Image: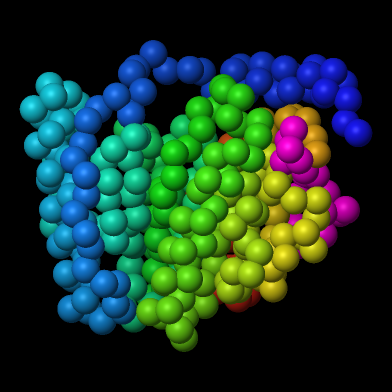
Amino acid sequence: MIDVNRIRRPLLTALVGAAIAVPVPGAARPSAVPAPVPAALPPLTATAAGLAAHYAAGRREVLAAERTAAAHGDRRRAASLRVMADPGRRFLSFDGRDGGRVVEVFGDLAAARRIAVVVPGADTSLDKYGLLRGGARRLAEALGDGAAVVTWLGYATPRTVSLDTLTTALADEAAPALRTFVRKLAGVKPGATISLLCHSYGAVVCGRAAPGLEVAHLVLYGSPGAGADDVEDLRTRATVWAGRGGGDWIGRVPHLPVPFGFGPDPVTPGFGARVFAAGDGGHSDYLKAGSVSLANIARIVTGEAPRA
């Protein structure tokens, strides 16, 4: 039996450490901005025409959310949504409610032989989507032709400084939606190789969604744990990779057993993942241009061995 009193101090240490590393913004929560209920999407197909219809439907949802935000008087949100509504953007789905749910494609999904699905971590929302999008664009450029990158902001991410970041509760809620999306993607792209790239708390989401999921690679980076005891506990046939930058504060967070934490550190030998070099970057630098981590993650997606 786990003694709750013994884990109280490590939990407090984790919260304090996160508070020092990631200041709490004074702005209102993204969920405070209203948005309409999305309309039903057309069936997802991998043809150019089918995807074009899907992207057009996604853009209509962005514009509807922009009008609602403007009517609410939130000019900042309305302005950012007008930028998102650029006809060149490719949204498989969009929902502006509750902080936002965004699934965006970078690259030619119809022709893609390799697909990387990026699952973000804490504090990712419409108001902070630029960081996730920038990393996805850089990854798509590194992968080149024949590949597509998909950002999957498909869940209510926790705030970094909150008790939600210390349990698997939100990850457990998100896992079925991620599993459904990946299976749908695999169904319309049966010949493509799919990789799940999971950052920070997103690694917990991926870990909870992993059992039985047919993906080639499961890449955990900047991870506090995967909500599992080891690779075998993930119950996946995917090759599991783990990396952490030398400047990432997540390395100082205590690793506690589920359900009071997320299990062992994925970069330790006992977890059983293949560890890749991630350079000296910080928690938000894994997909930074020119970084060791970006180069190695791209190599993993393409089926090549990462470089030391």
Taking the spot 34% from the left edge, 35% from the top edge, the residue there is 98
Q: Which residues are magenta?
A: 258-277
Q: How is the image coloured?
A: rainbow
Quarter assignment of residue 45: bottom left
Percent position of residue 184, x then y: 42, 71
Q: Is residue 198 left or right of residue 73?
A: right
Quarter where residue 207 is shown = bottom right
Spot occupied by residue 271 in the image (x, y as percentages of width and height)? 82, 54
Question: Which quadrant would the N terminus be assigned to in this image?
Answer: top right
Whether the magenta-drawn stretch holds residue 275 is answered as yes
**Spot occupied by residue 187 in the image (x, y as percentages of width and height):** 43, 79
Residue farthest toward the right in the current orientation of the protein: 1
Q: Is residue 191 above or below residue 258?
A: below
The residue depicted at 66 percent of the width and 44 percent of the height is 223
* In-image side of 5 versus 174 (left or right): right
> Which residue is at the front of the view, 256 or 134?
256
On screen, residue 8 versus residue 181, left or right, reads right
Determine which quarter of the picture holds residue 168. top right
Q: Is 38 above or below relative to 299?
A: above
Residue 180 falls within the magenta-colored stretch = no
- Is residue 218 in sight in this rendering? yes
Asked if residue 245 can be seen in this view, the reply is no
Instruction: Please give the count of numbered marks on the rendered protein.
Output: 0
In the picture, measured across the screen, residue 270 lies left or right of residue 125, that is: right
Secondary structure mostly seen in the magenta stretch = loop
Against 186, is 207 above or below?
A: above
The residue nearer to you, when weighing 137 against 14, is 14
| Farthest residue, direction bottom | 191
Assign the C terminus to one quadrant of the image. bottom right
